[in-house]
Image (cartoon, grey):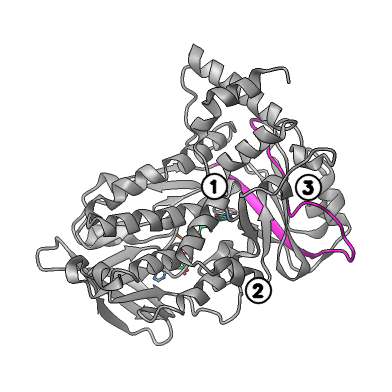
């Protein structure tokens, strides 16, 4: 089977720029089509699940949506088993995610309601543990090589500048540069991608960008769970409520009996990073449960702030690109993290690439990717735009009759989902990206929302 796949353009080598989630997942897909896949990562990669400089967000919480996990399992069938072995906790999002949303607590907080096990499953763990586990899995592929401690500094073009033929790497240890040739170079270097500049150096237009910045700041701390602590949640979220309630609190059980606790503030209402300020901010959330819970626990880390959270879309699909080059992951679409979509969007990109390679249709990649990520982009940017402080916010459209009805219906649906388990399960599936939001308009759902039962 692999031999057939290799027939694609007789490719010898693909280079992936960046060895974080997007780079690792895409390398796995490329391994079926290229003789050699080389991941170039500027950080020296730790042998343990530790945070690293090139992924500063790794100390912040990372929700893996059920859709993202489903794709990961497709790429690495053993992943659930290995994650469990490494200490990650399996989570059933319908049962074990307690959410205080715009209307109130999700119905799974009510012990009198029955929630059978659902298939909306993923794992909760620290971001370094997840990335390290995926990296371990790539070790099983003899044609994937990771060159760490090297930074890509430019793309190489052929004489006609129509095709990318490789990259220039600089060793961060001794500062020497060398060329690495390839048939395909993939930019998976994240938010701070330099490929718009590299493309311009080859004579191509840089992709236009859309930036919608909610001015959101996070502050995150790890805690040791108190001994004998009992709770039927694995993840708890007290959400912000636009336009005026800017604050949120996120708490998740992770490996080693620890919790990761995050406070967030929109519109420049940044949570403090000192002990007292952190707790005071926690006490100011719309519901006291988050504060009451962390108050009982022992902090085991400093408080880390993170403020690079703007939604940034680089429209690579709207410019002519050289052959042999594509971009994906946060380098294309970096999202406000509150909705937990970034890694899942990277996983979706890996699947789009797999389809394009299978159909020998790489030139359509950026257009197909743009389509695939539009739901995640729209959800994050529409929600963030509901805060008056968001920079570059989408202007509210003239509210016509239909839009008013849809808004009224959505609010009714969310309110009903706080008391009706079937609607709660459906909303969870949609927000975990397992089902289309169009499902909300299925006649059987409309009936449940509008009936008095
Ligand atoms: C505060 C915060 C919280 C988040 N929370 C969530 C969440 O809950 N759920 C979720 O799914 N997503 C979350 N995300 C998003 C998530 O971190 C990213 O979507 C995910 O890591 C995929 O990004 P990536 O691999 O494209 O880029 P990154 O993770 O940013 O990695 C880029 C990699 O490229 C390397 N690199 C950069 N330049 C070069 C170069 N020139 N040469 C070689 N290597 C280079 C870097 O060292 C790094 O390893 C969050 C993001 C932030 C900022």
Q: Secondary structure at mark 2?
A: helix
Can residue 280 be spotted in the picture?
Answer: no
Disc number placed over residue 336 in the picture, else none: 1
Vertical order, 343 against 4 (above or below)? above
Q: Is residue 211 magenta?
A: no
Q: Earlier in the sequence, mark 1 or mark 2?
A: 2
Task: Give whichever of 245, 433 is nearer the camera.
Answer: 433
* Left or right, 36 with reference to 447: left
Q: Secondary structure at mark 3?
A: helix
Residue bearing the label numbered 3? 281
Taking the spot 17% from the left edge, 63% from the top edge, the residue there is 163
* Left or right, 308 with reference to 321: right
Q: Quadrant of residue 242?
A: top right
Frontmost of labels 1 and 2 is 2
Q: Quadrant of residue 161?
A: bottom left
Image location of residue 59, percent across then percent down = 63, 64
Task: Give whichever of 140, 365 is nearer the camera.
Answer: 140
- How busy is the neighbourhood of tag 2: few (under 14 within 10 Å), some, or many (20 plus)? few
Mark 1 vs mark 2, CA separation in Å: 31 Å
Vertical order, 389 against 49 (above or below)? above
* Residue stretch in magenta: 214-243
Confirm if mark 3 falls within 8 A of ligand 1. Answer: no
- How busy is the neighbourhood of tag 3: few (under 14 within 10 Å), some, or many (20 plus)? some
Image location of residue 434, percent across then percent down = 53, 45
Q: Is residue 235 magenta?
A: yes
Task: Give whichever of 78, 285 is nearer the camera.
Answer: 78
* Left or right, 194 with reference to 241: left
- How busy is the neighbourhood of tag 1: few (under 14 within 10 Å), some, or many (20 plus)? many
Residue bearing the label numbered 2? 85
Q: Name the quadrant of the C terminus.
A: top right
Mark 1 vs mark 3, CA separation in Å: 21 Å
């Amino acid at each position: 089977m692999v031999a057939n796949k290799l027939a694609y353009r007789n490719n010898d080598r693909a280079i992936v720029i960046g060895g974080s989630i997007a780079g690792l997942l895409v390398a796995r897909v490329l391994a079926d089509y290229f003789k050699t896949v080389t991941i170039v990562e500027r950080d020296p990669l730790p042998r343990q699940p530790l945070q690293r400089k090139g992924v500063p967000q790794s100390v912040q919480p990372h929700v893996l949506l059920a859709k993202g996990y489903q794709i990961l399992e497709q790429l690495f069938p053993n992943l659930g088993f290995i994650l469990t072995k490494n200490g990650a906790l399996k989570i059933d999002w319908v049962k074990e995610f307690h959410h205080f949303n715009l209307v109130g607590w999700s119905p799974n907080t009510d012990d009198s309601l029955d929630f059978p096990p659902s298939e909306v499953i993923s794992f909760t763990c620290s971001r370094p543990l997840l990335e390290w586990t995926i990296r371990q899995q790539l070790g099983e592929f003899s044609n994937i090589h990771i060159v760490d401690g090297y930074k890509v500094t430019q793309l190489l073009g052929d004489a006609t500048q129509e095709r990318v033929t490789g990259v220039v790497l600089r060793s961060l240890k001794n500062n020497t540069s060398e060329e690495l040739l390839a048939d395909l170079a993939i930019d998976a270097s994240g938010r701070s991608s330099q490929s718009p500049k590299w493309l311009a150096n080859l004579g191509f237009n840089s992709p236009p960008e859309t930036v919608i910045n909610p001015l959101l700041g996070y502050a995150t701390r790890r805690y040791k769970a108190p001994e004998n602590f009992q709770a039927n949640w694995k993840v708890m979220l007290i959400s912000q409520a636009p336009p005026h309630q800017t604050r949120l609190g996120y708490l998740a059980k992770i490996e080693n009996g620890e919790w990761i606790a995050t406070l967030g503030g929109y519109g420049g209402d940044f949570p403090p990073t000192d002990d007292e300020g952190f707790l005071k901010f926690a006490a100011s959330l719309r519901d006291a449960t988050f504060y009451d819970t962390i108050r009982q626990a022992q902090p085991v880390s400093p408080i880390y702030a993170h403020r690079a959270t703007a939604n940034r879309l680089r429209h690579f699909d709207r410019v002519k690109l050289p052959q042999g080059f594509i971009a994906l992951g946060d380098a294309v679409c970096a999202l406000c993290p509150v909705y937990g979509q970034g890694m899942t969007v990277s996983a979706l990109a890996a699947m789009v690439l797999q389809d394009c390679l299978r159909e020998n249709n790489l030139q359509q990649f950026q257009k197909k990717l743009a389509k695939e990520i539009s739901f995640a982009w729209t959800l994050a940017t529409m929600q963030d735009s509901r805060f008056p402080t968001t920079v570059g916010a989408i202007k509210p459209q003239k509210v016509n009759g239909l839009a008013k009805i849809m808004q009224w219906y959505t609010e009714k649906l969310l309110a009903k989902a706080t008391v009706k388990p079937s609607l709660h399960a459906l909303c969870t599936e949609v927000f975990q990206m397992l089902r289309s939001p169009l499902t909300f308009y299925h006649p059987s759902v409309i009936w449940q929302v509008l009936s008095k039962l």
